[in-house]
Image (cartoon, rainbow, N blue to C red):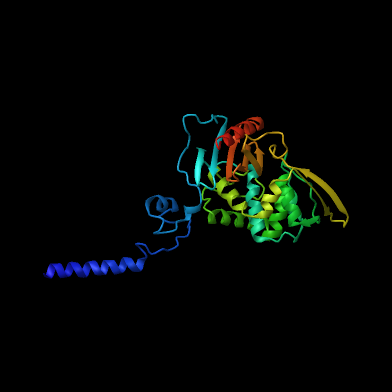
Amino acid sequence: MRMKRSFCLLFAGWLAVFSLAGCGRLKYDMDYQSVTGISGFQVAVGQKADMAKPFATDICVVSGDVMDEEAIDLAGAEAAALFDLNGKEVLYSKNAHERLHPASLTKVMTALVALKNGSLDQTLTATDAVKITESGAQLMNLKPGDSMTLDQALHILLLYSANDVANLIAENIGGSVDHYVEMMNEEAMRIGATNTHFANAHGLTNEDHYTTAYDLYLILNEAAKYEKFNEIIQMSSYQTTYTLASGKTKEVTYNTTNRFIKNEIQAPANISVIGGKTGTTNAAGHCLILLSKDTNGSPYISVIMRAESNDYLYQKMVELLNQIN
């Protein structure tokens, strides 16, 4: 009897502790943390959904390569992935977690942080930070004292991929380029892009500047929540007038670098490319990330990194998008 009574008291105490701790069917939030012994993925696959709301509930999760027997041959690219946003399903994955140079795909994060922290009508004024001397770097040739709105700058950043505009945005929104890069890294950690580290706002080569195909999906998925971002990436060209340091105005027109949007490359039947971002450097190779939709309006994100040539990049992106059908 004494043993039975002790067991009952022990069981009652155990039940009380676990009730207070939130086990059973008591719902509680579990926010993402970059340093934790339990990942959202582990909770999602190992626990019932009504016991906790893990970080990974609303995103696609992939731990390795995902290919069927008839998968496309992407030997000429280092990494690639295709994500079904509504179905939370990874349709294709090759080296999705390999850290690689992203080139100008970086500018998706640059735009995201600007949209989150800036105002579209605020005036940005150039300083010496816009002086970029790297050979071959894409520039609109801003000079210190030149000015434009954030709205104008985002159009030129995402369509024409001007590296000096990236620094213009960074310094004016972040107070300094270095602080803005810190904001980019903080945002990456917040959304779960833990294999990403930015060293600049434009994507020109730096050994400490890297991301992954999977992290780029997370970044574009977050950026696509902003109406202005979606509006810009669909445009084939942009014309505007900005103010020079002298006070005079200058009219400029820039075309998109995305060959799908320029109608140079056709997407597979029943797939519409909404837009995306291109990127090319010697270290990164040829890179492309896209937001697309099927005939039902369901969204998909596709990405290819370090392709051997521009033609190969677009050829394989068409094949990757065809996996949707």
Residue positioned 54% across, 39% down in the render? 81
Above or below for 97 versus 149? above
- Count of number-bearing discs: 0
Q: Which quadrant of the rendered structure holds the N terminus?
A: bottom left
Residue 241 located left or right of residue 310: right
Residue 282, quarter of picture? top right
Nearer to the camera, 101 or 234: 234
> Residue 15, how many percent across, how many down?
28, 67
Q: Which quadrant of the rendered structure holds the C terminus?
A: top right
Residue 126 located left or right of residue 52: right
Residue positioned 21% across, 70% down in the render? 9
The residue most toward the left is 1
Nearer to the camera, 130 or 150: 150
> Residue 314, how many percent across, how many down?
64, 33
Asked whether residue 97 appears in the rendered view, the answer is no
Asked whether residue 92 appears in the rendered view, the answer is yes
Residue positioned 76% across, 53% down in the render? 152
> Residue 106, how many percent across, how many down?
63, 47
> Residue 118, how many percent across, how many down?
68, 60
Residue 184, quarter of picture? bottom right
